[in-house]
Structure formats: structure tokens, C-alpha cells
Amino acid sequence: SNHLTDLYRKEEVVTVTAAGGAIQSPRFPNAYPRNLQLSWKLLSPHNTRIVLEFDSHFALEEPENEVCRYDFVEVEDISETSTIIWGRWCGQRVPPCLTSKTNTLKVTFKSDDYFVAKPGFKLNYSLLDNSPPTASRTNWEAVTQMDDAPSLLAPAVTDVPLTAAALDQTIAAFNTVEQVLRHLNPDSWRQDLDSLYRETAMYRPRAYQHNSRQNK
């Protein structure tokens, strides 16, 4: 039927190559249409992972009581045995950079039949070679939002989040957050430092908030 309240649904499979690429809400950077549910399944070659970075121009309909009920973009990490939801974002808070655990990510964008916003979102994706001995990157949760950090801390950092004790031991030699970020992420530590002040606590892992309270 052609009722205005019907969702327009579309799914697309995107092959991620070394050249990288981008996906975006329709009409970006202008206001996106209503009643959409668009999904992109990002597939990269075996033994690689996918890095996602949101454009800083980001705005969807605001959340209600800090929950993205209406318009949102969601990222899921998909394997044969499980699905991890990295997050669901809306409003004007730019989502963090993400590095997948597997070679398959699903990005879903939904808009309802009410308010729309501009510019929507744009998401750049790139390929990360996961094969040894190349330095791989950690996932977002492991080092409290210091995204895309080379695994200088421990070989296991790509598989399991560091324990608080191991992380404390590693960073004990540093005096400032800036030094920690430079060590973890020499290529983009300035952006990470900026993002620590830009992001809000609701998007940080609990461990990060807990450590922040302890350090005050």
C-alpha cells in the first residue's frame, strides 16, 4: 500500500576493499526523508577487520529520555555465533570510531514519519589487515574509548578487553592523558584528546566513567 506511514526498506551488501568508501543517509548533508529503514551489510576479506569513522557533521532526531526511539543509526558486529550491538546513536553527538571484531558489520539507519533533521550521517569505512605480524588495532571497549589504538599493550588486547590491573600497570609510567593517547595512538592522538572533551558520558563504557570518578 502507499500509506505515508509505510516504511521504505532497503538492504545493500557492500564489499569493503583497501580503497575504503562511505555510506550516508539519503540527501546528506541535507535533511533525510521520512519513513526509511536502510541497512548496509559491510563484508571484508577473511582475516581482516573493518574500521568505521563517522563524519563530524552528524545530526539525527533528538533522543527521548536519552533513548534513540525515533530516528537512529545502529552498528552491529556479526559473527556465526553472535551479534554485538556497538551502539545506537541519534541527536547531535558524533559516534566514536569503531573497529569490528569480525569481518562483517551491519549498519542500520531508520527514520520515522515525524521530525527529520539535517545533515543526517556519513560513515567512512576502511580495511584493517588483521594478519600477523602487522600491528592490529584494539576494539573500542578494551581501552576505554581510545579507538584504533595499535596493540602495544599486550598481544591479547585484540581478543579480550584488558583487565583494570593490566591497564593500570601499562599506563602507570605516564603523567597525563595526552601521553597515554600519544603512546596508544600516535597517528590520531590529537583527535582522540579532543573527543574526550566532546563526547558525553552516556556513550562511554562504564569502566571509563568509574575510572574518571576515581581519578578526581
Image: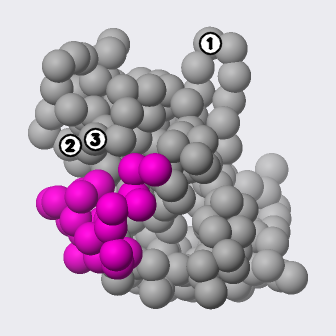
Q: Secondary structure at mark 3?
A: loop
Horizontal and vertical percent position of residue 200: 60, 81
Vertical position of residue 41 compared to residue 30: above or below: above
Q: Nearer the observer, disc 1 or disc 2?
A: 1
Separation (CA) of disc 1 from disc 2: 24 Å
The residue that disc 2 covers is 20
The residue at the point 86 percent across, 82 percent down is: 65
Vertical position of residue 118 compared to residue 157: above or below: below
Q: Secondary structure at mark 1?
A: loop
Horizontal and vertical percent position of residue 199: 52, 80
Q: Tag 2: Cα neighbours inside 10 Å, few (<14), some, or many (≥20)? A: some
Q: Earlier in the sequence, mark 2 or mark 3?
A: 2
The residue that disc 3 covers is 152
The amino acid type of the residue labelled 3 equals: Leu
Residue sitting nearer the eye, 129 or 183: 183
The amino acid type of the residue labelled 1 equals: Glu
The residue that disc 1 covers is 80
Separation (CA) of disc 3 from disc 1: 29 Å
Q: Quadrant of residue 206?
A: bottom right
Horizontal and vertical percent position of residue 205: 65, 60
Do the residues under discs 1 and 2 have CB atoms within 8 angstroms? no
Q: Earlier in the sequence, mark 1 or mark 2?
A: 2
Vertical position of residue 177 compared to residue 157: above or below: below
Which residues are the magenta region?
Answer: 169-190
